[in-house]
Image: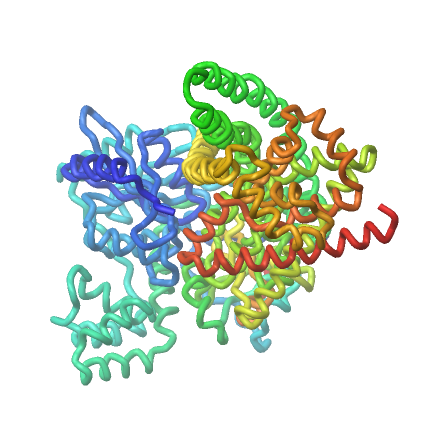
Amino acid sequence: MSECHPAGEATHKNELKLQRDLPLIALAGQPNTGKSTLFNLLTGLNQHVGNWPGKTIERREGVFHDNGRSLRLIDLPGTYSLTANSPEELIAREFILREQPDLVIAVVSAANLERSLYLVAELISLPTPLVVALNMMDVAELEGYRIDVEVLQAALGIPVVPLVATRAQGVRELLRVVDQVIKGERVLMPRLPDIRADHQQALKAIQSLIHGFVPQPYPLEWTAMKLLEGDAELTRLMHKTLPPERWEAVHEVLRSHDDALMAVASGRYEWINRLMRAAVARPPVGQISLTERLDRWATHPVLGLGILALILGAVFWVTFTLGSPLQAWLESEVVERLASFAAATLAPAPAWLQSLVVDGVIGGVGAVITFIPILAIFFAAFGLLEDVGYMARAAYVMDNFMHLMGLHGKSFLPLFLGFGCNVPAVMGTRVIDSWSARLVTILIAPFIPCTARMVVVAFLAGAFFGQYATLVSWGLALLALIMLVISGVLLNALLFKGKRSAFIMEMPLYHLPNWRTIALLVWQRTLAFLKKAGTVILAFSVLIWLLSTLPGGDLESSFLAMFGRLVEPGGRWMGFDWRLTVALLASFLAKENAIATLGVVFGSGEEGGLSQILVATYSPAVALAFLTATMLFIPCAATLAVIKQEAASWRWALVNIALMLAISIGVSTLVYWLAKGLGG
Amino acid sequence: MPPHPRRRWFSNEPDAPAPVSTDLPLPLSELASGEQAIFVELRGGRGVRGRLTSLGFTPGVPIFMVQNYGWGPLIVEVRGTRVALGRHEAKYIFVQRSQP
């Protein structure tokens, strides 16, 4: 699957070349400081979302205008520090050191000043000019903090601008300061943190040992500090660069100071505490914060799960009650009209061309378009829960359960997205910090019953099981989740020998949602889905059309039917004839295609007619087996494409296909014979 | 519900010496909800050292146990931030009980 279209790439490069001359500003900040809100506020829709080269980490870049001049803005990944603990931290610091932006804006949370200044303590030691954006002043006030910005600014020696990014307060002032610093009208006299006193000798010793050997663009003192911190990346680099005897000497110093990381960090926190003592008044004792109140319920090991279940239920209810009518409307008013318009326009054209456009192209595009309302509503609900700070609580209460699979709470977040669509779920695994946990999550995500599969289940269960339809639907969803857990346990045991990853997660303060942030999130996620799924589904839709048309022009004698008959013996285990087998295979294109394909092979366009034909043709046992197979069948083409992209190899996509194929055939065979035995 | 005695988030006075306790350091996972302790050291768990440090776990810092039900993950407050930790991770973090 190719990522870039040649033409698109060229324009993008041109665009970047033009922007090269613009002043470059980097936004740095810890997670939960409102950094993205500020980025969105400044750039609006004028932003480009991509990946950092060679990494599956989101890279956001945009342009904004101030006082008749344009500036480039890069949103660095949110990181707690600049030590190479994670790819994000490496990206952030390499960008600042190598690209040398004109200015770095450090976003800190006024409500979490002590911790969020830690990154500032690191940034201020780098050669790039720094401005502090003191965000979330409203939340800080609510929590009872009083911050003297003037004093903080004087103590830091660099500009500090108070902000409420969610209400766009303080942005004008921030831009004014940015402008002054870039033009050199404002002199910065940063006061740097120092290493704890008992390690100053060690720092000096290392500094003199590596002097003259530190490669560009790394500053000398900074490199010495990072070696003391035990930074893996720089240790490797200096080991390579230094002559062996010098490296030995450096290594000796490091060995005799193995608590140096703590000394460096303590030095930074002492620096922070000096700032805090000067500039911050503490909240009155005895005040119970909103976060504390809400967390007594939301993070309770039992009540918390109940609350999560209620919230999940509400999200699905809203998604389907709002989304389904919209979906039906789009189907009848847009897709079907488009199809009949195309059919009428192409009436003089050869029949194959008409069929290609109507069945192949419009059929494929229609599947994507009608799916969007459900997906967008689901994304909005997810975005809202994320923005108010609830998602960290959901991850927390699910941690115990996720441990069964060697995963921890954070893996729950992408899996939750999977109920909407597996594509964003696989992409969403980026929040997981360990590779093994991420890979397991990617491989089990396709078991999550997405809305598209639930549509198929709802239709067929309704036709076959009448009043028990809901029960059957829930049972099938539960079955899929049980398979998810079993696969997760097995994958973890086989691939990673039960290794587990550390669960360390900040629980952000609850705050009011910012609609702009959520709207932008929905827009970007939907757009990403459209780009990814849209292109894959369109391509496969045309391919399937070809296979179902060639060589004779009708389905019964097509390649697809031939293939269906070829694998029919396999389908027979599950009680399928060639038509059901073909329908199952077609669900690879997009899950809801299973029904459309049945409509085609039974020559019945409208669904009411189809369900009657199906009930007359197949026994309930066959129907149940078919639903089971559809639920557990290999991921759709779009999901496979993102699995390949996120796991960075086809190998894992193939592992996933093999796993799901084995499970879907095995389980639905079992279901078929059980149901038959029980008299279905 | 465990009681939530109030603690000071940070003090306005210069760094006071940490309250001295004669108890031996114990794993953070053994602290009950509402108890307060002083971070002593990280034993083992090299891989998480950097992450914990940047979140504020440095020697001498007060840690407040917000929630510990004796099983599953727990929540602590350190330097004004709530941090969720897996039980496994909390076993490597050694602290000394202190009076709130």
Name above or below for residue A96 compared with residue A237. Answer: above
In which image quadrant can residue A44 be found? top left
Q: Nearer the viewer, residue A499 or A212?
A: A499
Residue drawn at 70 percent across, 29 percent down? A610
In which image quadrant can residue A3 be found? top left
Residue drawn at 25 percent across, 52 percent down? A95
Residue drawn at 35 percent across, 36 percent down? A39
Q: Nearer the viewer, residue A220 or A163?
A: A220
Asked whether, in this view, residue A30 is left or right of residue A475, the answer is left
Name above or below for residue B49 compared with residue B1. Answer: below
Residue A664, percent from left and from top: 65, 53
In which image quadrant can residue A169 be found? top left
Residue A472, percent from left and from top: 77, 42
Residue A627, percent from left and from top: 70, 44
Outermost residue, front direction? A552
Residue A172, percent from left and from top: 29, 28
The mark total stands at: 0
Q: Is residue A413 visible?
A: no
Name above or below for residue A279 compared with residue A47. Answer: below
Q: Nearer the viewer, residue A138 or A233?
A: A233
Coloring scheme used = rainbow
Q: Is residue A550 visible?
A: yes
Asked whether, in this view, residue A131 is left or right of residue A112, the answer is left
Q: Nearer the viewer, residue B73 or A560?
A: A560
Asked whether, in this view, residue A157 is left or right of residue A573, the answer is left
